[in-house]
Amino acid sequence: MSKDSLDAPVNYEAEDSAVIMVPEKKIVLYGKTHTTYKNVTLDAPRVELDQKSNVLVATGEKDSLGETLTRARMQEGDNKFQSDTIRYNFKSQKGLLANTITQQSEMFIHAEVSKKVDSNTVYIRGGRFTTCDLDEPHFAFRANKLKIINNKVAVSGPMHPEFEGVPIPIYLPFGYYPLSKGRHSGLIAPQFVATETQGIGLEGLGYYQVLNDYWDVLARGSIYSYGGWNASSVVNYRKRYRFEGGFNLSFLTYKQNFRGDPDYSSSKTFNIQWRHATNAKARPGVTFSANVNAGSTQYNKLQQGNLRNNLNNQLNSSITYSKNWQDKPYQLTLSANHNQNAETRRIDLSLPDANFNVNTIYPLQRREVVGAARWYEKLGVSYNGSFRNRLSFLDTNFNIPRILDSASWGASHSVPLSVSLPALGPVMVTPGINFSQQWMRARTFYNWNPGKNKVDTVTEKGLYTASFASFGLGVNTSIFGTFQFRHSRLMAIRHTIRPTFAINYTPNLARSYYRNFQSDSLGTITNYNIFQAASFYNNGVQYYQNGEFGGMSFGVENVLEGKWRSKKDTGDNAIKKIHLIDGFGFSLSYNFLADIKKLGNIEVHLRSTLFDKVNLNVQGNLSPYGVDENGRETETYAWKSGFGIGRLENLSVSLSTQFRSEPRDPSKTNTVTSANNNNRISDPTLLADQARLADYMRRNPSEFVDFNIPYDLGLDFALGISRRFEKDFKVRSELNSGLNFHSSFSLTEKWNFSTYGYYDLNTMKLQALNLSINRDLHCWQMSIGLSPLGQQRYFSISISPKSGILQNLKVNRTRYFTDF
């Protein structure tokens, strides 16, 4: 080929042979040929190059019956074509292709004749659009004329669908297929639903608009035959390496049955959500985050088909700003919190919450240390300060002046002192001193009013303080022991014992904060703290206890580990470390200065991972004192009253395990867990975005089934026991236990059966059960779901294409059976 005819060389090679026709200036290649020109690559069984016209003709290979064995393959940039015949002009970059298959985004395009007019535009006659990757697709949309703009859009004239080559008499005047990659604006198709409570309706109709690289908006709505409707607007924003977040504003008008029916009801609710998070690298040391979820108290209950929200009667919000000074020991956190209870209709606001901390500093440490550090140089001082303001009101009594007048605030200061003494062999000794003080806006007094036969409450506002101090000395060490086993696969067991011992003294600085008052007409005397109604204590801060403590505390932690020799493996992995008991121990305290009941409760715990499969967690609390015939605790030790080493007051046991098989094909991985296998779909701790994803997974389970996993089984068991004595030593026990289970079985590579449920062991009844059958239909999928138990029961069947570009082209029938 002459270098003057083209602005770049044409490189070619052939596995079989090459015929050069000099007079005609042609070259014919046979066998597995490979031709390249700039960004154009072509592979074909036969290629003819014409130097005069700069035209290349590539043809495929057919058998004696005319069936195609091998197609010519052409690639130009990201565009790939497979054709029986390809005619391509290197100079003009135009081409004519016969019986071509090309892929644009998720769409496969079959064309009888394709005319390539430039590097981005192709005209097609006799075309089919499909997401099926077979040469003879299971379904397609057929049109006589099409135009494709690479990676942007495809448009066609009149079109109709066909299945297995059989045309369906449903015609559309034109076709529009977005082919662009990434985000793009467009209409969101609704789905038809039928419910007993709201009638028939269209759900999810909306429009998605990409404003720019940083903002996008999604507007959706639903309408029902009984007159109900809902609308939502979601705005997402993101700036790379800086921040990301989104707003969600929703309105819901719920109407059950027609007006005039005995069961008619109507409610209007709204919900506001905001999430925001800054990137830690944007401003080192500074973070800002927001997670706001507020609105009408009935909003969660009225959402159709969302069990997670129906069972959640709490709305919570949090906005937090924090700053860490670089090379300084200072930390500042500012936050605002909101809690809303749908049952009591109470709204609690904590605004603002401020915390300022100073990490441990060593004021007596020399600037230039020469030799060993002196003991007093290890004296450390830190500071923890906080401020909290609380507002509380009912959503039915919203009065701003009254709310502001009822505001209650408090502050706390704490100054811990510690000394790191040198280790005494294997023993570590740590003394410490802590002084703290709390400031409150108000104090409360209670007095019995005999005239009105009730308790009068008097609140005095001002600035009041309460102080606290403690002194302690802690001692801890670790003891190790190893047991060797000969001629056993269990080679050794290592036992680690970690005892801790502490001596503490706390003077009673809170004596003046406690009062006695008559609480009823019988003359009952009740002791109370005058600050216990303050905001600071109602936000999780414990007020100072009345009493002096001078005593000790003791605890022991045990860990068992082992070495296991494998029978099969003789290499580096033949011996592995196993965990027998991750933690087992107890703790107790003894107050020498207490007048009665000097010995504190005994707390025991056990943590273990059995066989690397079963997670076990046990926690218990035992009282060291007995009870009398009236069920009241006495001062006599339990072991002297016939109750053993201690009297069990409460016990909690949790067991969880998961058995998951290896994938059939390790090269195929599916990072999305099946919706029916995900036991957190009804978890009220999920964030709003996760909840919307979980709801979509619940409605479309077949899109999230991993057929590559033969089986997956999970069990979660929880048991809680609380015991108290009544008269005549009768024991009243409260037991709560339940079993969560989920399973997924792919009996074949195409069939999957999944379940999720909750069994209440108290009532011995199955409280919730979700069943689904999923079928992989190659380019389509089918799912049948059934929930026969619970507050919201439903039956659904869905058949849809796998491809996301056609996810709304589905047959979906869902019927809800709701109990309120």
Image: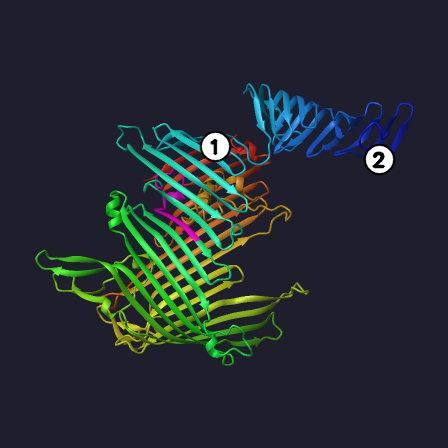
Q: Which mark is on residue 812?
A: 1
* Residue 774 x %, y %: 52, 39
Quarter holding the C terminus is: top left
Q: Which mark is on residue 59?
A: none
Nearest the viewer among 267 and 622 is: 267
* Residue 561 x %, y %: 54, 69
Q: Say which quarter of the image contains residue 621.
A: bottom left
In terms of sequence position, does the residue under pointer 1 or pointer 2 come before the other?
A: 2
* Residue 611 x %, y %: 53, 62
Q: Is there any visible trace of residue 520 in the rendered image?
A: no
Q: Residue at x 35, y 31 (%)?
A: 228
Q: Horizontally, is 15 left or right of 268 in the view?
A: right
**In the displayed image of the protein, which residue is found farthest to the bottom?**
424
- Between the residue at mark 1 and the residue at mark 2, the CA separation in whole angstroms equals 53 Å
The magenta span reads: 300-321
799 relative to 174, above or below: below
Secondary element under disc 1, as helix, strand or loop, is strand
Q: Residue at x 60, y 51 (%)?
A: 662
Find out whether the residues at labels 1 and 2 contact each other: C-beta distance under 8 Å.
no
Quarter holding the N terminus is: top right
Q: Which residue matches tag 2? A: 14
Q: Say which quarter of the image contains residue 139.
A: top right
Q: Residue at x 86, y 35 (%)?
A: 16
